[in-house]
Image: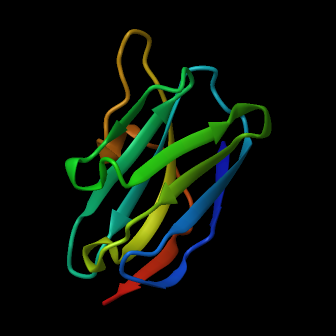
C-alpha cells in the first residue's frame, strides 16, 4: 500500500508560480508511474504530468513549457513546478501512483493509478 501526501497549493495571480510536492510512503514498486492530476469544479479529472522511474515525462499540451514534473527517488518525493499560471489552471490537484507494467509507458489513465493523495487546491486569479 502506498500513501501520498500533497502540499504546496495556494492562491496566486495569473502569471505567477507555485510548486506542489508529493511525499510517498509504503511499498513502492521499482517500476512505477507518478502523476499529477487536476479536477476543476464540474469537470472530470485530467492527467497533467507523469514521470516514471527512469525520469521519462509526459505532459498535456496545455501545460507544456509551463509545468515541470520532477522526482527525488531517494526520498520518494515528487514535485510539480507550475509557472506562468493561468486562470484555467485553477483546480484541485492530486498526486497519484501506480505500478508500471513491464514494457509499457506511463499514461494518464485514471484506472492505472491505485493510490491517490488527498488533493491540494490551486487557485489562480486574474
Q: Which quadrant is the C terminus positioned in?
A: bottom left
As drawn, the residue found furthest toward the top would be 103
Q: Image height check: is 14 above or below 97?
A: below
Q: Image height check: is 109 above or below 73?
A: below
Q: Is residue 67 left or right of residue 47?
A: right
Residue occupying the point 47% across, 84% down = 12
Q: Is residue 54 left or right of residue 29?
A: left
Which percent across, then down, holds residue 34? 51, 40
Q: Which quadrant is the N terminus positioned in?
A: top right
Where residue 37 sits, quadrant-wise, is bottom left
Q: Nearer the viewer, residue 51 or 45?
A: 51
Q: Nearer the viewer, residue 104 or 9?
A: 9
Q: Image height check: is 34 above or below 36?
A: above
Which percent across, then down, holds residue 2? 65, 44
Residue occupying the point 35% across, 36% down = 58
- Asked which colour scheme the image uses, the reply is rainbow
Residue occupying the point 59% across, 51% down = 79
Residue occupying the point 62% across, 39% down = 71
Which percent across, then down, holds residue 74? 78, 32
As drawn, the residue found furthest toward the right would be 75
As drawn, the residue found furthest toward the bottom would be 126
Q: Is residue 100 left or right of residue 3?
A: left
Amino acid at each position: 500500500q502506498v500513501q501520498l501526501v500533497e502540499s504546496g497549493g495556494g492562491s496566486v495571480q495569473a502569471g505567477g508560480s507555485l510548486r506542489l510536492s508529493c511525499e510517498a510512503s509504503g511499498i513502492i514498486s521499482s517500476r512505477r508511474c507518478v502523476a499529477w492530476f487536476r479536477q476543476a469544479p464540474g469537470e472530470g479529472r485530467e492527467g497533467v504530468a507523469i514521470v516514471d522511474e527512469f525520469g521519462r515525462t509526459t505532459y498535456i499540451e496545455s501545460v507544456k513549457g509551463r509545468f515541470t514534473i520532477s522526482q527525488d527517488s531517494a526520498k520518494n518525493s515528487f514535485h510539480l513546478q507550475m509557472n506562468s499560471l493561468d486562470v484555467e489552471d485553477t483546480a484541485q490537484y492530486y498526486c497519484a501512483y501506480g505500478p508500471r507494467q513491464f514494457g509499457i509507458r506511463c499514461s494518464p489513465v485514471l484506472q492505472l493509478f491505485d493510490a491517490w493523495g488527498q488533493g491540494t487546491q490551486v487557485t489562480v486569479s486574474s
